[in-house]
Structure formats: structure tokens, C-alpha cells
């Protein structure tokens, strides 16, 4: 009953309204959710922007987090059947299995993508006998800004222009990229 009182306090409502809110969340998720999970999700949502959809999303993420936590504790799921007869690799630990399951490729920033694109373009140019002037991505963007309007040559536009020019197999230089941005805008 204490959690219902805390939920009512967060919602700034009566306990009856809080329990009805909890029921509607449970109906929307279509799963039995404990009051503690619901309370944890409510605490994460901005109190000024409380609505059922936001709380539902928070509860789902809370449930997923709890599920991941339980999966890590219990280790890998055991299979029944032909696979169960095969011994598992003793060198593989639970931590490694959990890491493989939850590992996602890291999202690269725009600056990192630009650095990689410039590096590959310039390596290709050197392979063809050209001698490109190498610089960091930040220096490249600053050089593009010297040849164009800073407001037009945002980092994202510089990257997009570099991708277009690189797809045409042209050497990337600040002036070429600045010209492409000016033509685009």
C-alpha cells in the first residue's frame, strides 16, 4: 500500500486515481507489472510531462532493464534436445556471453565519420600517385569555412558533400567541398 501512496504523491492525486492509473498502464503494457517497477518508471519521467504514453515507455524500459539484469545473473539459457548433449566451451564465461548478447556497434559521431572518409579518400589518392595534403577532420572543416559561409557549411553538410564527392572518386579538398556546399545551398 505504501507504493500506491507514493505513486499518488508523484501523480498528485488520490490513491484511488493512482491505482486506476496503475491499472491502465498494466492494461496498455498487457503484462502484470509490480508497483515497485511502476514507481521506478514514474520517478524517471518528468513530473510536468506525465502522461500514460511516456510512463508506458518508461515502464517497458524498466522491465527490459530488469530482464537483462536477470539474464546476466542466471547465465545462458539451457537448451533441451540435441544441443544439450554437446558440452559447452569451458573457456567461455558468463560475462563474455552476456557481453556478446548486449554488445552493440558503437555509434560513430559525425566528426569520426568525416575523419574516416577523408582518410580512405586520401589513401586511395596516394595509391593512384597523388600527394594529398593531409589534415585532421577539424582542420578540414575550418578550411572549408574559410572558403564558404560558416552557416551553410555545417559539419553534417560537410560530411554529406564529402560523401557525394567521394562517390564520384574525386580527391577531397576544402575548396572542392566548399564549392559543392555553395552549389547545394
Image (cartoon, grey):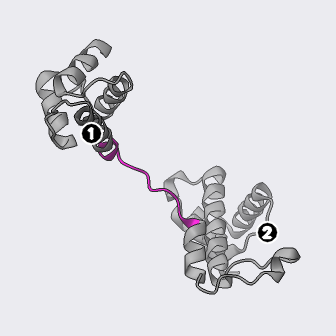
Residue 36, given in percent of the width and then of the height, sits at: 65, 76
Q: Residue at x 39, y 49 (%)?
A: 108
Residue that numbered label 2 is attached to: 32
Q: Is residue 101 visible?
A: yes
Q: Residue at x 83, y 82 (%)?
A: 85
Q: Is residue 115 left or right of residue 90?
A: left
Q: Is residue 83 left or right of residue 166?
A: right
Q: Of helix, strand and loop, which one carries label 1?
A: helix
Inter-mark Cα distance, 1 to 2: 57 Å
**As rendered, which of 148 and 45 lies closer to the eye?**
148
Query: Would residue 108 be counted in the magenta stretch?
Result: yes
Q: Of helix, strand and loop, which one carries label 2?
A: loop
Residue 22, given in percent of the width and then of the height, sits at: 72, 64
Residue that numbered label 1 is attached to: 123
Query: Would residue 109 be counted in the magenta stretch?
Result: yes
* Quarter of image, res 87: bottom right
Q: Residue at x 19, y 35 (%)?
A: 141
Range drawn in magenta: 102-113
Instruction: Name the quarter where the C terminus is drawn.
Output: top left
Q: Earlier in the sequence, mark 1 or mark 2?
A: 2
Amino acid at each position: 500500500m505504501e507504493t500506491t501512496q507514493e505513486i499518488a504523491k508523484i501523480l498528485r492525486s488520490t490513491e484511488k486515481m493512482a491505482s486506476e492509473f496503475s491499472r491502465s498502464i498494466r492494461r496498455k503494457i498487457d503484462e502484470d507489472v509490480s508497483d515497485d517497477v511502476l514507481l521506478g518508471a514514474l520517478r524517471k519521467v518528468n513530473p510536468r510531462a506525465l502522461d500514460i504514453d511516456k510512463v508506458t515507455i518508461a515502464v517497458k524500459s524498466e522491465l527490459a532493464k530488469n530482464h537483462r539484469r536477470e539474464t546476466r545473473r542466471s547465465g545462458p539459457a539451457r537448451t533441451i534436445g540435441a544441443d544439450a548433449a554437446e558440452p559447452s566451451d569451458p573457456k567461455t564465461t558468463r560475462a563474455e556471453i552476456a557481453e556478446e548478447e548486449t554488445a552493440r556497434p558503437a555509434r560513430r559521431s559525425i566528426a569520426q565519420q568525416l575523419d574516416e572518409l577523408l582518410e580512405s579518400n586520401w589513401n586511395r589518392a596516394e595509391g593512384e600517385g597523388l600527394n594529398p595534403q593531409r589534415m585532421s577532420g577539424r582542420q578540414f572543416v575550418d578550411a572549408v569555412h574559410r572558403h564558404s559561409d560558416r552557416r551553410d557549411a555545417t559539419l553534417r553538410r560537410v560530411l554529406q558533400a564529402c560523401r557525394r564527392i567521394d562517390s564520384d572518386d574525386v580527391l577531397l579538398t576544402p575548396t572542392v567541398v566548399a564549392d559543392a556546399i555553395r552549389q547545394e545551398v
